[in-house]
Amino acid sequence: MERHKVVLALIPALVLAGCIGGLSGEADPSESTGVSPEQVPGVSNGTLSNASALVEANQNAVTTNGAILQVNQSSDQMTIDARLVVGADFSTYSLSGTGSVPDGQSTTIDQWSNQTTQFVRTSSAGETDYRVLDEHDDRISFLASVEEFLSAGNFEVANETSDDGNVVLTADSVSAANTSDVDAESFDSRLVVTESGRIQNLSVTTTQDGKTMTYSYELLQAGVDSAPKPNWIDDVPPGATVQAQLSIGVENDSYLTLEHSGGDVVPSATTVQVESNGTTDTESLDSSLSADEMRYVYFDASSQQLQVSADRPEQSTVSPVTSPASVQIETEGGAVLYSGSMGWDSESVSVRGSGSSSGSMSAESSKTTAPTSSSQ
């Protein structure tokens, strides 16, 4: 079974946010009405000379006071529709939205985090995957895209203010000192920012190789106490908190190796399913699997049944695993710790799916999947 793990890799900005209607932009009461462009962080001599300073000021405003943000991006490569809710003092945040790639593959992402744990749910191609991480981001990752665009454009203070009296900067070309990854033939952007450096909205249209990309960032609401915990967290399957860095390799074109390079102990009731040799079979681990340990996975030559062993098998006892092969590792509670497919020949291994390394197939340890009929 080939699984598509394209979410979170669409662009760094695709860390998405909850669907909340009926919101509108609100000014922060602490903002002054007599805005001076020269007081805006990163702005000097009528130009945006330090994009990083402006992004940092905006980040501080969002995480200190809380906010609801909307990000959209559209190109021939992908579309993104994302909303992020940040609680005051970055105590909680939620994020949800959708993204699609040229083949029509659409992915939905939902994320919620408090100060200790991140919960992530992704849905794509009829499958719903979960991740639970014992960590909390200290930055809003999709602001990296904002900084790239602000660093790329030749922004100058416009001879106008926004309807609410804030500073407007525009750019109609790429800066000669562009330090970002944006390489555009044409660049057209409008930025509205408060005196304190909080970005109200940013719109960008670029053209490269005759193809157009549009991007928008908008502050929908300033001042949000917290991001409510969503109901879908109750659906996170048992075992989703197991964090183990697992990888699958091939030895002697005959059997597979399952390596645990770090993280939590994988329980002994965990099953390994292999699809190869025109058949599919499932076997439990012979014992719990700890970091720096390995198991050998192979089909027995006599019974053709799948075996999982801590001991390297004798070549004569193995029915060779043939290319291509698919492997899924699932906890007793139905959470998938690993799922991927690969093909190889006598010289190399080519990888499809979640990760790669020379001669092996790797998976992110945090991927877990809700039980479905296709993964049982």
Image (tube, rainbow, N blue to C red):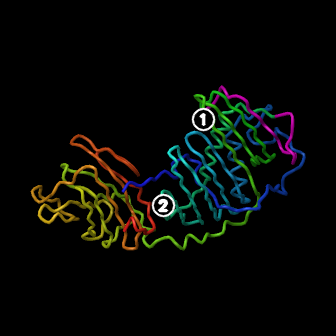
Q: What's drawn in magenta, residue-wise?
A: 158-182
Q: Where's the C terminus, which quadrant?
A: bottom left
- State the image quarter where residue 154 is shown: top right
Q: Which residue is mark 2?
A: 126
Left or right: 4, with 61 as reference point: left
Camera-side residue of 115 and 247: 247
Please state which amino acid type lies under the numbered disc 1: Ser
* C-alpha separation, residue under disc 1 versus residue under disc 2: 36 Å
Could you say which quadrant of the image residue 111 lies in? bottom right
Q: Residue at x 31, y 68 (%)?
A: 271
Q: Which mark is residue 180?
A: 1
Q: Helix or strand or loop: what does disc 2 sit on?
A: loop
Which is more toward the observer, 374 or 62?
374
At label 2, counting other C-alpha atoms closer than 10 Å, the crowd grade (few under 14, some 14-19, many 20 or more) is: few
- 107 on left or right of 283: right
Q: Amino acid at mark 2?
A: Gly
In this rendering, would 130 be left or right of 223? left
Quadrant location of the N terminus?
bottom left
Q: Position of residue 255 (x, y in %)?
A: 21, 55
At horizontal 26% and vertical 65% (from top left) the residue drawn is: 281
- In primary-sequence order, the first of circles 1 and 2 is 2
Q: Residue at x 25, y 49 (%)?
A: 323
Q: Secondary structure at mark 1?
A: loop
Q: Position of residue 316 (x, y in %)?
A: 9, 57
Judge left or right: residue 357 versus residue 210.
left
Vertical arrangement, residue 109 with respect to residue 10, above or below: below
> In the image, what residue occupies the spot 30% across and 57% down?
259
